[in-house]
Image (cartoon, grey):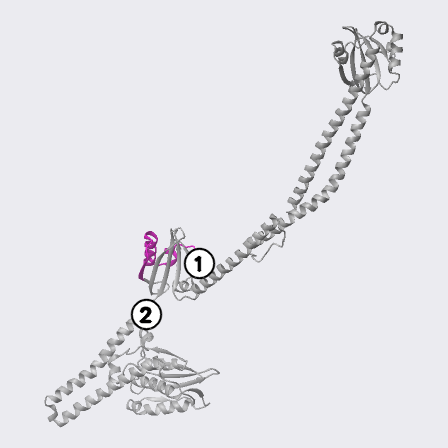
Amino acid sequence: MTRFRIKLTLTILGLISLVLLLMGMYFAKVLENSYLQSLHELLSRESKLIAQAIRFPDVFSDRAVLEERVLQVAPTDEVRLTVIDRDGLVLYDNSTQVKEMENHHDRPEFLAALHGDTGISRRYSETLGHDMMYVAVPVMQGTEIVGAVRSAMSMKDITDTIHNMWYSLLTGLLVTLVVGSIVVSRISFSIIRPIEEITRVARNITQRQYESRVRIKAKDEIGQLAGAINFMASSLEQQMYEISENQQRLSGVLTNMTSGVIFISEQRRIMLVNPAVEKLLGTPGHEVVGKLHIEAGKSFGLSQYIDRCLDKSEKFREEVHIYYPQERVLDVNFAPYINFKGEARGVVVVLHDITDIRRLEKMRSDFVANVSHELRTPITSIKGFTETLLEGAMQDEETCRNFLQIISDESERLYRMIRDILDLSKIEQKRIPLHMHQVHLQELISSAVAIMNDQANRKQLTITLPSQTPDIWLMTDKDCLQQIILNLLSNAVAYTSDGGTITIHTEKDTKQVKIQVIDTGIGIPEKDIPRIFERFYRVDKARSRDSGGTGLGLAIVKHLVENLHGHITVESKEGKGTTFTATIPLV
């Protein structure tokens, strides 16, 4: 902006200088013309007066009388007077000897006078050595021109006057430039300063400093412009704040969405992904953005549906299977992105991971099938033996007693199954309240082992109790913890071969207690480990049925541990045994 200020100052000073020069030249020319006109009139009058005085033949032909008559009419020598005859011969001159003067027949003013006109000429005089103005008039004797009277006067005074005027003009111009530069500088500063301020605010706005304002309170057009800039800045600040808020909200929504969102441009390149998509694709977002969707997604099915949405601009929903980085089932919504002109410019893809839902649906289906199967077996037995008794077997007391014992056992098994299902349902729904008490862990484990001693002794199993020192106390629900230990022990007894061992180990740190139940039983195949906590899931269905289990024990254990804010893990090798580790927080 300083360059503009200098340019404006120089422009104004140049205009002032040009105006002053033009005015000086004009007035100098007017003054010069005025002087010349005055001189011309003076010389013309002088010449005409002399011509009238010497027009008589007796005067014009006698040089002595001629000189006397001229001196009578013009006694001073301020004006050079020259009398010339028709042939150009100088008859009289008041400033130079006539004999020394050359013939004037070729002088322009003389030639004009011979034609009856007033001749005027300006030229350098070799005789006097400076510029002269010559005015010649004819000398008339009747109607005949017998010669001419020429008056001349030096132009030195006029030239000096004009030179002085130019000197004064240039001096005034220099003073005017000095004063004008100061004044113009102030004026240009007052003009440029608001523009600089407006420019500064405009530049700040382009750099997103929307709080900048123009500090000008003038009421002229500049002030109106400043007010408009301030209003624009305020409006932009509000709009950018709203845009930023909307972007933050949108970013927050996209970031925290469990569903994946992908935006694909009309060039079939990925332009936007949220963190959920990064988890689904197993690739950071910055490595995906900008790539073709078929390259980044690594799923032919998903890419096929994206291309369909791009080509047909239709909205639809499909279930897609992806296999990288791991197998997943996705419920995908495809919708075209329509801009404000109503043109399709891309595709918005929303991916819902329904792998767990499908797995739960399968588990629910398996659960229904297992419940139906488990309930059908004791009910079929009860129904069969009851029908046999009704058909006449009641007459044989021994057979009747055996049948009734079987019916009683199956009823008890059916009762336990229904009770476990109801307990599991209550535990899952957190409808069982927790009663927190200080519990001595070794004592609780000893009482649980005492309950299982009869079953262990029948199979000649050795149960090793944890060390009694140091005492382990924790704040927990005694009944829940006892049921956890009993179910783990029952499971270990059921799946440990005769003569095997079961070891219970405890470990405590500052935050939690670990309870391990280690057996030397049949173990669990690696493929079955992820599913052993499912309801009614059995690794060895024949053995579990023989043991009288309902298939719900480990599911109950898992939910009870989670209700106590702990977690349970399992390690097992087929044919070598299994270790269950339940971790319970101290508080």
Query: Which one is earlier in the sequence, the residue at label 1 or at label 2?
Result: 1
The quadrant in which residue 124 appears is top right
Quadrant of the frame with the C terminus: bottom left
Q: Magenta residues, as a range?
A: 290-319
Dot 2 alpha-carbon crowd within 10 angstroms: few under 14, some 14 to 19, many 20 or more? few
Q: Position of residue 184 (x, y in %)?
A: 70, 43
Q: Is residue 502 visible?
A: no
> Which residue was labeled with disc 1?
287
- SS class, disc 2: helix
Against 45, is 313 above or below? below
Q: Nearer the viewer, residue 311 or 496?
A: 311
In the rendered view, does 36 fall on the left or right side of 439?
A: right
Proximity of marks 1 and 2: CB atoms separated by less than 8 Å: no
Against 294, is 526 above or below? below
Residue at image location 59% in from the left, 56% down from the top: 213
| The label number, if any, that marks residue 357 in the structure image | 2
Q: Nearer the viewer, residue 277 or 534?
A: 277
Q: Position of residue 139 (x, y in %)?
A: 79, 9
